[in-house]
Image (cartoon, rainbow, N blue to C red):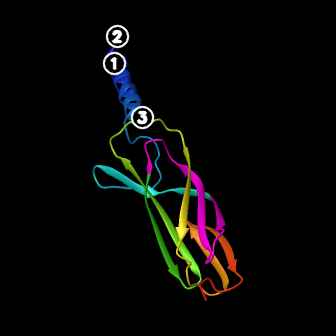
Amino acid sequence: MSLRTNILQIILAIVLLTGCAPGALNESPEPKGDGEFIHGEAVVEKVEIMFLESFPLQVHVTAVGYLPDPCTDIEEVFIERQGTHFEVLITTLREADVMCIQVIEEFEQIIPLDVYELPAGDYTVAVNGIEAEFTFLQDNSLP
């Protein structure tokens, strides 16, 4: 073989190996690694409101979505209320150096809201950007 053929084979091998290296796959720009773990946000596709049969009423939010692979888990659920709006954030956690099949993993997360003693009115809930609404026809407190 000629020197030129050898150089082309070496360049081709480098290109192919670089394409198979960890991290060569396109990942979402949102996750941030801290050296050992990758933190991100779950992708939520649907939010449903459930009222439990009790008084005062109890409200649970069901978030349905997916994680990027079976190695990613839900890390924490943060809930913040400002007036009549609930903001919910579902974060994820994944070990950084673990090889994992690239198949999305569906999830369903039930999130109880603190609605005791809220006045009658319309309320909104946003879970990772997906919104739903509910209404209290009367104050949600014991007389």
What's the amino acid at mark 1?
Asn
Q: Quadrant of the C terminus?
A: bottom right
- 102 relative to 45 in the view: left or right: left
Labels 1 & 3 near each other (Cβ < 8 A): no
Label 1: which residue? 6
Q: Quadrant of residue 15?
A: top left
Vertical relation: 93 (above or below) 113: above
Please tell me whether mark 1 sits on a helix, a strand or a loop: helix
What's the amino acid at mark 2?
Met
Query: What is the magenta range?
Result: 46-73
Question: Label 1 vs label 2: CA separation?
Answer: 7 Å
Label 2: which residue? 1
Label 3: which residue? 19
Closer to the camera, 6 or 41? 41
Vertical relation: 143 (above or below) 61: below
Which residue is most to the right?
A: 137
Mark earlier in primary sequence (1, 2): 2
Indicate which disc residue 14 carries.
none
- The secondary structure that dominates the magenta segment is strand
